[in-house]
Amino acid sequence: MSKVLAVGLLVIAFQNCAQTPEFSKTSMASLESPPEEEVVNCFGRTEGTTWWVPSNEVINENGVCEFGGDLNYSYTKNVELICSNGNAVLTGQWQKGNLISTSGACLPATCNGKASGSTWSVPNGTLSESQSCPSSSVIVNAIYNKNDVFICENGKENFVKSEKGTYIGLDKSCPSPDLNASFSSEKVAINGTAGLITEGINVSTMAYTCSDGQSGTLPVTATSTNIKVMQDLACTVKGTNAVGVSVSKTVSISVTCGSNEVKSGGKCIVYACKSFVEITSFPVVIPERTEAGVCYYAKLFNKIAASPSSGDRLSFVSARNHSGSPGAGGTAVTNVAAPYVMGAFTNKVTLQGERSVKLSGSSNALTSILVDNFVLMGSRLASSTAAISNYRAFGSADAAIGTTGKIKVNNSDVALQAFESGGTATIGTLLLTNDFSVGKQYELNVNALDCGGSKALSDIYLVFQ
């Protein structure tokens, strides 16, 4: 209330009191000097009074988290007012008021950075377990690393248990499971049998399976099991010990195909010449047979039409003499002469694989050879210093000396296989396969010979099938 208002009220009161006929000295004295009232403003607050009131603003404050987190508090913001000249004025001071809400949370206590509830292992020495060796009565100790497991609980590391860690090894060796396996030979003829030789060492069971489907169980003791061989085979022998540890070995055997067969995918099939390649120079190396069916030939001698005998004679060969008296009819053992040479071939040949080697009257077909009087063949290893040997003679019977049925080569008897009694002999094809072994170089000698009188010869080819 202002001073003017207070004075006004006092005047009115005084005027009202004037109607009273008398005043006491005390009353008068009061009226003469009335007491001054305290002035009240700012909603009942005196001048200079301060007070706090909430504002529309909010104070956000992060909570204190020892181990981290996102805890947050929200408070009202209180501001300070002062009564100044009857008006409430901001002093500029403020303070945190009542808690409104919280958000987020503090993280739980950790153990040196390990989260609460997490576990971890700490290496702590070793531990051992006794065990029997597989398929053996030997007892050993298996050694493992030992790990102690801890858990973080409310910031404290607590021991949980000890457990087995990584395997280190045995304190002594167990007899290792093993087995032996082999075939009785490296090769076997087609449709033959071979022994599968096996023995188990510290295994409890053993069996075999082969690439052609053959299979069966095997005793663990040393044994030989007959295996039918109809193609190249790979057989795997497996053994298993008492705790399921297995060992295996694979052994192989190769099949040898027949004289007119070739391998295809490890199996023998009938070989057929699908094409022919001419040999133009010697020495020659003949490739092994393949499914492509490539065969080879060389022309040794050209055809000679029937005509009187002539030419050089082969001095180291003796046969019946068909010239002069008594001529072809002379069977005396003294009626001999070196035959005339119609054709002579000597050179070196190497086979890289099985081949059928023949003399034929044609390059690409097996046709008969015509000769008057005989064909003589011999061979030797090219590395040998001995003379060519292994001679055979084929032709007409009247080429033999006397009635012996033989001719002589280097003064040694050689049987003459007769295809005609006399004249020009049709002797078919001649097989030379046995003159060669695979992988070795041989020197081959072939001669077309005439005993005199007249001569005749067909083309002669050396054919490799």
Image: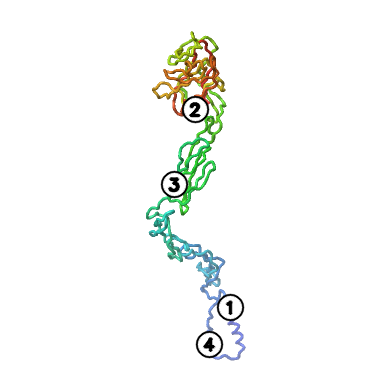
Residues tagged 2 and 3 counted as in contact (Cβ below 8 A) = no
Q: Position of residue 458 (x, y in %)?
A: 54, 16
How far apart are the alpha carbons under marks 3 and 1? Answer: 136 Å
How far apart are the alpha carbons under marks 2 and 3? Answer: 42 Å
Residue at label 1? Answer: 5
Q: Earlier in the sequence, mark 3 or mark 1?
A: 1
Q: Nearer the viewer, residue 361 or 142?
A: 361
Q: Earlier in the sequence, mark 2 or mark 3?
A: 3
How far apart are the alpha carbons under marks 2 and 4? Answer: 159 Å
Residues tagged 2 and 4 counted as in contact (Cβ below 8 A) = no
Q: Position of residue 331 (x, y in %)?
A: 48, 14
- Residue drawn at x 46%, y 54% is 242
Residue at label 3? Answer: 222
Q: Nearer the viewer, mark 2 or mark 1?
A: 2
Q: Position of residue 101 (x, y in %)?
A: 55, 67
Give the crowd class for mark 2: few <14, some 14-19, many >=20 residues within 10 Å: some
Point out which mark residue 287 bears: 2
